[in-house]
Amino acid sequence: PPLPIVLPASTGQGLQISPQLTRRDGRVFYSMLFENNSQVPLDGFMIQFNKNTFGLAAAGPLQVPQLQPGTSTRTLLPMPMF
């Protein structure tokens, strides 16, 4: 099934983000697809998790390369298990 869109390009100034929680080798990751639908390169991505009942938080920094116009990239953000 297609990934849910949490930031549509129309409100993200051309940036669209589609995430999904996934498990690999017993570890939990936040798998994210970043799409640049703007006419300029995008970089300097950051993420913040609000306090939540599941205790989800990032276990490391978000690492996304500069996105050229019309390109996309996927990244895996490790999530700690409490």
Image (cartoon, rainbow, N blue to C red):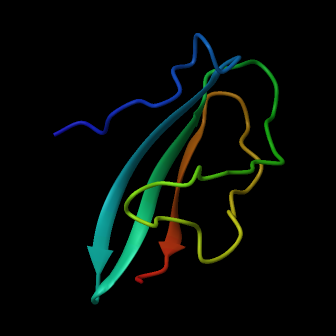
Please give the name of the residue rendered at 60% of the width and 77% of the height, measured from the top-left corner: 59
Q: Is residue 37 left or right of residue 55?
A: right
User: Of residues 2 and 62, which is closer to you in this image?
Assistant: 62
Which quadrant of the structure image shows residue 37? top right
Q: Residue 14: x percent and y percent?
A: 66, 19
Q: Among all residues in the image, which is located at the extreme left?
A: 1
Q: Quadrant of residue 2?
A: top left
Q: Position of residue 4 (x, y in %)?
A: 33, 34
Provide residue 24's location: percent of width, then percent of height.
Answer: 30, 80
> Where is the N terminus found, in terms of image quarters?
top left
Give 54 or 33, whichever is nearer the viewer.
54
Which residue corresponds to the image point at 59% horizontal and 53% vertical from the top-left? 49
Is 25 on the left or on the right of 15, as rendered? Answer: left
**Relative to 15, is 57 above or below?**
below
Question: What count of labels does the image hold?
Answer: 0
Q: Residue at x 59, y 49 (%)?
A: 50
What is the x, y in percent for residue 76?
50, 66
Placement of 60 over or under 6, stated as above or below: below
| Residue farthest toward the bottom in the current orientation of the protein | 25
Q: Which residue is rendered at x = 69% and y = 64% of the image? A: 63
**Which quarter of the figure is the C terminus placed in?**
bottom left
Note whether 26 is above or below 54 in the view shown. below
Q: Is residue 11 above or below residue 28?
A: above
